[in-house]
Image: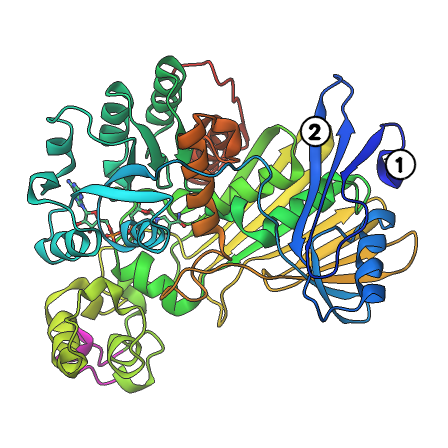
Amino acid sequence: MTLRHPLLAHQRTNVQGSDRPIIGGTAQRWITWNTKAGHVKIINYISRTIPDDMNRRKLLKSFALSLGGTIVSTQLLARTGEGAYEFAIPPNPLHKPLDKPITAITLGAGNRGMVYGGFAAGNATQMKIVGVAEPVPYRNDRYAKIHTIPDANRFTTWEHVFQRPKFADAIIISTPDRLHYGPCMKALEMGYDVLLEKPIAPTERECRDILALSKKTGRIVAVCHVLRYAPYFVKMKELLAKGAVGEIMSVQHLEPIEHTHMAHSYVRGNWHNSKETTPIILAKSCHDLDIIKWVIDKPSKQIIAMGDLKWFRKENAPEGSTNRCTDGCKVERECPYSAIRSYYDKRQRLNVFDLSADKSKHADEIMDRLKTTNYGRCVYRMDNDQPDHYITSIRFADNVTANFSMEAFTSYAGRRTRIMGSMGDMEGDMNNLVINDFRTGKQTKLTPKAEDVEGYANSGHGGGDWLLARDFVQAVSQQNPALLTSTIDESIESHIMGFMAEESRKNNRFMDIKINRNKAV
Ligand SMILES: NC(=O)c1ccc[n+]([C@@H]2O[C@H](COP(=O)([O-])OP(=O)(O)OC[C@H]3O[C@@H](n4cnc5c(N)ncnc54)[C@H](O)[C@@H]3O)[C@@H](O)[C@H]2O)c1
């Protein structure tokens, strides 16, 4: 069957597979189009089990919408109101059943190591963790126990893993920012495929070295740009590629960090000092630059950035405040950044404290951490240097422009994006995506149903964490990096944008962006 997609009228669009969904069975359909180069590209895929109780008329309507409409796609789960739909991203048709799980060694069993470890634990047929390197005994023990790792495969630091001959398919690098380059280069040299936490590395030269070595060795480096796998952003990208708003003119993107998250991570926490980690435009916002670049899908040309650390400074410390919130601070009860309020009263973001399993001990343990770690220090008296507001403007090819704001001072989190096009606009907050079509005057609201990470509610990057892990498993198993959307090749551009933004911010000038992937620095 051949039909013409209204927005791809110059190309042939083919629909293959079962044309009639079977009630109580599985309907499958591939929609492909022939590119100018003559290749056939899958642009959509349906595979869903149709519940017996779903009535046929409703079902046919959802398929008709998917084929006839310009914006509503095929993976509709349910109509939730006038012009409103819930959707999910269906299984990738290129995924294959595995004969055996891939094996992996985790370097850094902290927060992110636990996320990917959690995927392995929940999906034993896909991934098996066979080794760990982690200097904190509590975390090393916890990881070894969850994954039944033999003592011989437990190490205190990443270097020790590579003193042994290769003993797994892949390495998961979830060490701190400054400890990505060393293990990644070593892993590639030894023939491992790599799941590499972002940021790739703190300098452009190191990022380019990793790219060059992955090309030379032919190994896979999957960068954890997890938002590329979140159904919400996958759908946004797909709709834009199909022309749902016509030609993209400009993008506005906001990363509202939320004031307490800022205080936790970038004032008191692991990323408070850019020299010890990476500048916040990479540490926090390489995701945002990456998503902007990914959805616009054109080369970036120029960038300019401004921003400062304005509030979390010594001169703003209120009278009566003390070095630690627990030192008898006179304003602690009214301070929005109080560590006691955040960690003790509200029990927020406790994963950094390695608390014991026995909850009755938590109150004492939290108080102890507030008295002994950076997490109890006054936000105005830290040795922090990360900007608390940061704006960036980017010019892409064909004069498409984007504005990005990273803001610490919000009461809410969740990225907001607005996309302005010649035939419509799109607006989303990661919960809903609203598309207005200027041609029809119609509005469509799409709500993703994402698989989130257990115990990591609202922080699993809209489901992207585990969906990336799933694609990584397939890429390693099939030895095919094309199963990933965030290989190092794909991801390096947004990092270079970040390095250029930081240079622009510091030197107060416009920067040209030169990507050339074959260039060494
Ligand atoms: N993809 C994302 O959205 C996302 C989100 C948060 C963090 N990150 C990145 O993931 C990485 C890890 O962040 P995290 O939040 O898990 O931090 P974390 O501090 O919780 O975990 C890092 C772990 O590495 C361990 N480590 C330190 N030195 C080591 C060494 N020499 N060998 C082995 N392990 C060592 C630490 O003890 C710690 O347990 C960072 O680069 C961070 O920027 C990515």
Relative image position of residue 7 (x, y in whole percent): 85, 39
Q: Residue at x 11, y 44 (%)?
A: 150
Q: Residue at x 88, y 53 (%)?
A: 438
User: Neighbour class for label 1 at 10 Å: few (<14), some, many (≥20)?
Assistant: some
Relative image position of residue 15 (x, y in whole percent): 80, 37
- Majority secondary structure of the magenta segment? loop
Asked if residue 146 is positioned above or below residue 168 in the image, the reply reads: below
Disc 2: residue Cβ within 8 A of ligand 1's nearest atom? no
Relative image position of residue 280 (x, y in whole percent): 38, 48
Asked if residue 298 is positioned above or below residue 375 in the image, the reply reads: above
Element under disc 2: strand
Element under disc 1: strand
Q: Quadrant of residue 292?
A: top right
Q: Nearer the viewer, residue 251 or 160?
A: 160
Asked if residue 27 is positioned above or below residue 263 in the image, the reply reads: above
Was residue 328 drawn as part of the magenta stretch in this picture? Answer: yes
Was residue 243 drawn as part of the magenta stretch in this picture? Answer: no
Q: Residue at x 76, y 17 (%)?
A: 38
Mark pair 1, 2: CA separation: 15 Å
For the N terminus, the quadrant is top right
Q: Residue at x 49, y 56 (%)?
A: 463
Relative image position of residue 193 (x, y in whole percent): 34, 28
| Label 1 sits on residue | 3
Q: Nearer the viewer, residue 291 or 228?
A: 228
Question: What type is the residue that disc 1 sits on?
Answer: Leu
For the C terminus, the quadrant is top left
Q: Nearer the viewer, residue 180 or 378?
A: 180
Find the magenta span and give its range: 319-331
Q: Quadrant of residue 325?
A: bottom left
| Label 2 sits on residue | 41
